Image (cartoon, grey):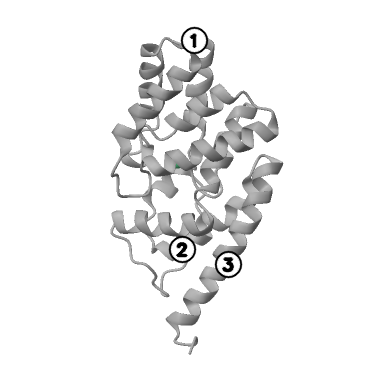
Amino acid sequence: MNKKEVLKKTKEHIKNKLSGEGSGHDWWHVYRVWKNAVYIGKKEGADLFVVSLAALLHDISDWKFNDGDDDVGPRLAREWLIKMRVDEKIISHVCKITKEVSFKGSCVKTKMSSKEGMVVQDADRLDAIGAIGVARTFAYGGHKNREIYNPNIKPEVHNSFEEYKKNSGPTINHFYEKLLLLKDMMNTKTAKKIAKERHKFMLEFLNRFYKEWKGKDF
Ligand code: NI
């Protein structure tokens, strides 16, 4: 099978698997990450086949939906790529990226070990900020039965992956625990530039949110 066919089949496979998912990790999230990863990868001179496969497979089974087991995703990705008869070298590279790519709490640094990995991680993080990030964060919060905002519960800093997983605070806190930190965690120059604008929008959103909360916008 040539690369184009592998990508087409992989796209269909993920689309079928994730369509209609309601927590913000649906097919359209993967689609945006894929498109943005290819854009960033081109600018950064990365291997676009590896970037595309890793972007398409990065949420095949997210640890957030597997009781914290972050090995399920890479295993499913590997099984799929073997079926597609992709070279072992590419399979291990792609699976390594899918394992490294999840965000594991504000103080837990996940360093990507290849340029392709950095590109996919940046694209995934970009989809967590800006207007799309705001929408996805509230969708995920609702999925987890979280309050939108509770002025009595302050944001927490998570020093470990375990703490981050247990977190159940209101969704607004998630901006301080994760989203506003992402701008400075981008790996590539291209993503840093995009992140700057998206970050600015989130600050405007929060500003406006508190204003309306207090009834000070009229
Ligand atoms: Ni993702």
Residues 118 and 149: in front is 118
Residues 94 and 86: in front is 86
Tag 2 near tag 1, CB within 8 Å: no
Label 1 and label 3: CA atoms lie apart by: 44 Å
Camera-side mark, 3 or 2: 3
Tag 1 near tag 3, CB within 8 Å: no
Q: Position of residue 48 (x, y in %)?
A: 59, 25
* Element type where label 1 sits in the image: helix
Name which residue type carries label 1: Glu
Q: Local crowd at mark 3 within 10 Å, few (<14), some, or many (≥20)?
A: some
Q: Which mark is residue 88?
A: 1
Closer to the chain start, of discs 2 and 1, is 1
Closer to the chain start, of discs 1 and 3, is 1
Q: Residue at x 36, y 17 (%)?
A: 79
* Element type where label 3 sits in the image: helix
Q: Is residue 217 left or right of residue 66?
A: right
- Residue pointed to by mark 3: 203
Q: Local crowd at mark 2 within 10 Å, few (<14), some, or many (≥20)?
A: some
Task: Judge: label 2 CB < 8 Å from ligand 1.
Answer: no
Name which residue type carries label 3: Leu
The answer to which image quadrant residue 61 occupies is: top left
Q: Can I make out residue 24 in this image? A: yes
- Residue pointed to by mark 2: 173
The N terminus - image quarter: top left
